[in-house]
Image (cartoon, rainbow, N blue to C red):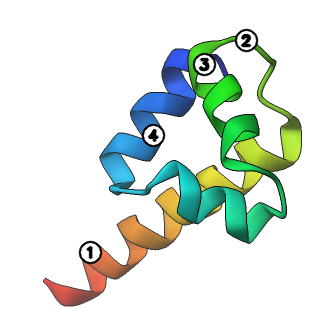
Amino acid sequence: MTACEFRTALKTLKLRQSWLAERLGVSTTTVNRWCTGKAPVPGYACFVVALLAELATYRGHRQT
């Protein structure tokens, strides 16, 4: 996942960087570095964001 894809996913899911950082046990600065491309997005962060996206999709389908 590129920095742009990661940033877009957070925006789409309406997640704050600070919220994700707290759940992943990293600093907000670290998440910001992933979003800006200053550091590569690690696989575990991609996995968590993908799971959150799937959950949002699942919940959206259940409510309709």
Tell which circle, 4 or 1, labels the residue nearer the N-terminal end: 4
Q: Nearer the viewer, residue 34 or 59?
A: 34
Q: Nearer the viewer, residue 61 or 11?
A: 11
Does residue 62 lie above or below 28 as drawn? below
Q: CA distance from mark 3 to mark 2?
A: 9 Å
Q: Nearer the viewer, residue 10 or 28?
A: 28
Tell which circle, 2 or 4, labels the residue nearer the N-terminal end: 4
- Label 2 sits on a secondary structure element that is loop
Q: CA distance from mark 1 to mark 3?
A: 26 Å
Does residue 39 lie above or below 31 as drawn? above
Q: Is residue 64 left or right of residue 62?
A: left
Tag nearer the camera, 1 or 3:
3
Does residue 11 lie above or below 27 as drawn? above
Q: Which residue is mark 3?
A: 3
Q: Which residue is mark 4?
A: 9
Q: Which residue is mark 1?
A: 60
Tell which circle, 2 or 1, labels the residue nearer the N-terminal end: 2
Which image quarter: residue 29?
A: top right
Residue lying at 50% horizontally and 17% vertically, measured from the top left? 4
Percent across and percent down for residue 53 are 48, 57
Q: Bin the neighbour count of mark 3 within 10 Å (Cα to Cα): few under 14, some 14-19, many 20 and up.
A: some
Mark 4 is on which residue type? Ala
Q: Nearer the viewer, residue 58 or 32?
A: 32
- Label 3 sits on a secondary structure element that is helix
Mark 3 is on which residue type? Ala
Q: Which mark is residue 38?
A: 2
Q: Is residue 46 left or right of residue 42?
A: left
Q: Quick one: which residue is furthest to the left in this view?
A: 64
Q: CA distance from mark 3 to mark 4?
A: 10 Å
